[in-house]
Image (tube, rainbow, N blue to C red):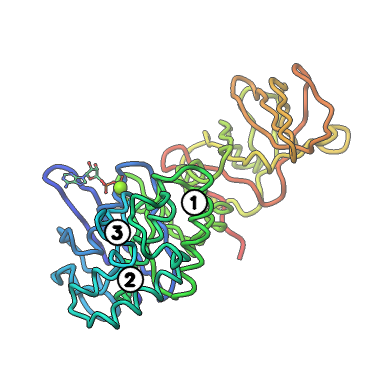
Amino acid sequence: MKIELKEITMKFEDVTAVDSLNVTINEGELVSLLGPSGCGKSTTLFMLAGLYKPTAGQMFFGEKLINKIEPENREIGMVFQNYALYPHMSVLKNIMFPLKMAKVPKKEAEERALAMAKLVHIDHLADRKPGQLSGGQQQRVAIARALVKKPKLLLLDEPLSNLDARLRLEMREEIRRIQQEVGITTVFVTHDQEEAMSISDKVLLMKDGKYQQYSPPQYMYDHPENEFVAKFMGSPPINVIPVTLNQSEKTISISGTENTILCPDNLNFNKVSGNQLTLGVRPEDFMIVDPSETNQFISVTVDVVERIGRDTLLNAMVGEKHIRALVEPDVKVKKGDTLHLAIRNERFHLFNNDTQENIIEIKS
Ligand code: ADP
Ligand code: MG
């Protein structure tokens, strides 16, 4: 089912939890709502569920305006962080419960519940009680129960955050598999950028109730529209380095160094409002270069060298500023060395210090 939110706002007395949000989710997509704690993810999900009624704006399921439709009439399935299973009921009875409430005949309900148990790979545990299951298995039961009525929209609110790291990895792959097998439109709330990156068709990143960017995750990582998005996506995080723009020369000077480098040709000067900008470079987008071969580099002083298997992570100083660079594992450097780092082609972000906007245009 296609979902459309138009100028959706939710106010709680003096707090605007969600502020004029516009989003379209296409049929069959898995969209993550991502952002720091308190940014309005759950509030958005609860509005989709019908547990909260928006203060303003319109919500459509398909062609239908659903602002005033009660949760039980929305054809949704929901899973929360705490699985909220009935402890005295068997796994199968837990999964059957929504069908029982809907007065589906017992035999049919059992068959459908068992088919769901198979889908989420817990059919062999059907007779156990929730207390006899691991956290991951309990979450599988909760997902089966949310899907058993064949809803048109699946809503998941941080479903993995109670699981340990290894199970979290396994379960996020499982959620993606189940979602794709069923083909159900899904909204997945998480504050974990890596989780959102790994399972989503698209990510909606929010901050203080406001839209930041809505894109496929890799696109968001490669083309952040503003400094907040750039910093939120990626670990180790993007480096931000103060620079001074020379508009006529089309160069930037790196504060605290003697280095001046050329701006990329896709810089949008209409978005520039001052000379002080912030250069954003991801750690993996630095390359060590030979200063006799190019003058397009930033000089850094190596501080800490961490060998981390596949790569070497350098901590270095650019003037007063700490940066991180991921370089080849066999690079021979030590604390105190001066290195020359160039930025990989097209992996250049420049943020306006007033608007935080990325002023590099995306080449189409
Ligand atoms: P998230 O899920 O992203 O952590 P929430 O949607 O739960 O964030 O909350 C967004 C903002 O709205 C927060 O400032 C929170 O304190 C506030 N908020 C959420 N629910 C309520 C409520 N029922 N009453 C008052 N304020 C609320
Ligand atoms: Mg929340």
Q: Nearer the viewer, mark 2 or mark 3?
A: 2
Where 151 falls versus 311 (above or below)?
below
Q: Which badge, 2 or 3, comes first in the chain's sequence?
A: 3
**To which residue does mark 2 refer?**
153
Quarter of the image that includes the C terminus: bottom right
Where 35 falls versus 6 (above or below)?
above
Label 1 and label 3: CA atoms lie apart by: 22 Å
Label for residue 302?
none
Q: Residue at x 76, y 39 (%)?
A: 287
Q: Secondary structure at mark 1?
A: helix
Q: Viewer-proximal residue, 176 or 143?
A: 143
**To which residue does mark 3 refer?**
21
Q: Residue at x 55, y 44 (%)?
A: 234
Q: Nearer the viewer, mark 1 or mark 3?
A: 1
Quadrant of the rendered image containing residue 61 = bottom left
| CB under 8 Å between discs 2 and 3 | no
Count of numbered circles in the view: 3
**To which residue does mark 1 refer?**
195
Q: Residue at x 35, y 46 (%)?
A: 207
Q: Secondary structure at mark 2?
A: strand
Picture coordinates of residue 241, whole percent (x, y): 58, 32
Question: Looking at the picture, which amino acid does disc 1 mark?
Answer: Glu
